[in-house]
Image (tube, rainbow, N blue to C red):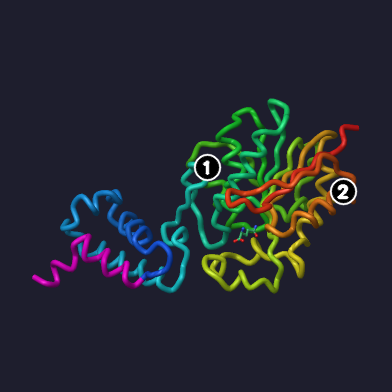
Amino acid sequence: MSSESSLTCEALLNNAIERIGGDSPRLDAELLLSHVTGLGRTSFRAWPEREVAPDQAQAFRELVAERVKGLPIAYLLGQQEFWSLPLKVSPSTLIPRPDTECLVETALELPLPENARVLDLGTGTGAIALALASEKAKWQIMASDRIEEAVELARENSRSLQLPITVVRSHWFDQIPESGFDLLISNPPYIPASDRHLNEGDVRFEPSSALVAGDDGLDDIRLLVTEGFKRLNPGGWMLLEHGYDQGDAVRDLFARAGWLNIETRKDYGGNDRMTLARKPAS
Ligand code: GLN
């Protein structure tokens, strides 16, 4: 009797909540139980005594154990929502962040041609490129990543969401012969190698290739600012995500390379998060 009662939703959740701790133990536990049972999260409150099949209870406990070790909830679910799109994620890519949705918003406000040619560099799951594709059916959107698993994941997300983008494997511009883009957009690695933030929370489990960029965190941004200039049409735009304290440095890099209309914008938390710049029209 007691072993059976431990398989109710309520018992499983309460036990997990206690073990998970942290900021959002109930949400985490409900998401994981919903993932293994296929039941909606609200049903656990409406019907807490509902029994969970033993194999599902076991799968749930295994996921909880991983969460207790700190594994990001997105990797355990294999999914993360971005711009209301359910994206498949894996440990070979960064987990898309809400702050990166601010880049998408900014890109959508730019005065771009109706059939703009766009390149999302270091696309990971394909998040930025797919969000843009979901809003602009006429844009010709290309996305690149250096990591083969990311390229495959971005293609899979493109297929399952039925949002056509072209995904190529390339380290920044190395395998991309084309120029003539109207918008270059990227959430590149920008964390300095010695940053303490790398030992905290989800980032511990994310690929350092997506996070770390040299001693000052600007190695990749430096490359994008100079090489990107050559690949844009006159009057084209570049939009880069960066750290909250890198606005001055990034504006300076753009200014030295001859860009115009250089402007840093904030994320949802009110921190500097991205810088926009335009290539001169002639
Ligand atoms: N914003 C992410 C973080 O600080 C880092 C993303 C990136 O380096 N591109 O967790």
Residue shown at 21% from the left, 66% from the top: 11
| Coordinates of residue 190 in the picture (x, y in percent) | 70, 60
| Coordinates of residue 219 in the picture (x, y in percent) | 78, 62
Kindly indicate the quadrant of the structure image that contains residue 222: bottom right
Residue shown at 71% from the left, 60% from the top: 245
Kindly indicate the quadrant of the structure image that contains residue 149: bottom right
Circle 1: is it few (<14), some (14-19), or many (20+) Cα within 10 Å?
A: many
Q: Quadrant of the N terminus?
A: bottom left
Residue 276 magenta-drawn? no
Residue 11 magenta-drawn? yes
Amino acid type at circle 1 is Trp
Name the front one of labels 1 and 2: 2
Specify the label residue 255 is tagged with: 2
Q: Give the magenta range.
A: 1-19
Specify the label residue 148 is tagged with: none
Amino acid type at circle 2 is Ala
Circle 1 SS class: loop
Q: What residue is disc 1 on? A: 83
Total numbered badges shown on the rendered structure:
2
Residue shown at 54% from the left, 68% from the top: 205
| Coordinates of residue 86 in the picture (x, y in percent) | 46, 46
Give the CA separation, mark 1 to mark 2.
Answer: 31 Å
* Residue placed furthest toward the left: 1
254 lies left or right of 47: right
Circle 2 SS class: helix
Ligand 1: give its quadrant. Answer: bottom right
Circle 2: is it few (<14), some (14-19), or many (20+) Cα within 10 Å?
A: some
Mark 1 vs 2, N-terminal side: 1
12 lies left or right of 122: left
Q: Are marks 1 and 2 in contact (CB under 8 Å)?
A: no
